[in-house]
Amino acid sequence: MPRVLLTVEDSFVVEGQGVVLLPKLEPIGDEVFRAGDPIQIRRPDGTVFQTRMHGVEYLTTSTESFLVILLPKNVAQSEVPVGSEVWSCSTGSQECDGKLD
């Protein structure tokens, strides 16, 4: 079932890889996320686009390790401003109708 995975609070670019979105991704129950999973980005201005997770990676700091979403290289940091909602969705669902970038 589609749900808000996170609301973007910050992001940064990993050169040659793509944009990493923060805060951390917190699975609920037995949720598993994988590279290639479709997602929908709902920007604060009301525009929406579909893409896929390029990766789901562990980010480690001196105090914790957590999951983050890595977007495909063709998605610019400016395309996912602070306040954007990242929604899970499944291919072919009404929530994700349209072309995946």
Image (spheres, rainbow, N blue to C red):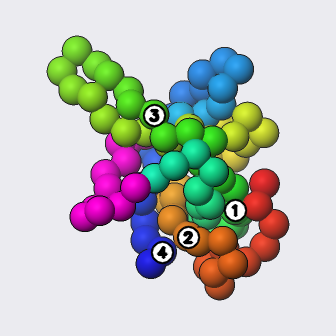
Q: Are marks 1 and 4 in contact (CB under 8 Å)?
A: no
Q: How many labels does the image show?
A: 4
- Would you identify the image quadrant in which residue 7 lies? bottom left
Q: Between disc 3 and disc 2, whose residue precedes? A: 3
Residue type, numbered disc 3: Glu
Instruction: Give how far apart the Cα atoms at labels 3 and 2 are.
Output: 19 Å
Q: Name the residue under label 2.
A: 89
Q: Mark 3 points at which residue?
A: 57
Q: Between disc 4 and disc 2, whose residue precedes? A: 4
Locate residue 31 relative to residue 99 in the image: left or right.
Answer: left
Q: Do the residues labelled 4 and 2 touch (CB within 8 Å)?
A: yes
Q: Between disc 4 and disc 3, whose residue precedes? A: 4
Q: Is residue 20 above or below residue 13?
A: below
Residue type, numbered disc 4: Pro
Q: Where are the magenta residues, as a range?
A: 21-32
Q: Which residue appears at 73% of the width and 34% of the height?
A: 73
Q: Do the residues labelled 2 and 1 touch (CB within 8 Å)?
A: yes
- Helix, strand or loop status at disc 2: loop
Q: Which residue appears at 50% of the width and 60% of the height?
A: 85
Q: Between disc 3 and disc 1, whose residue precedes? A: 1
Q: Name the residue under label 1.
A: 50
Indicate the position of residue 38 as horizontal and vertical percent values.
62, 60
- The numbered mark at residue 2 is 4
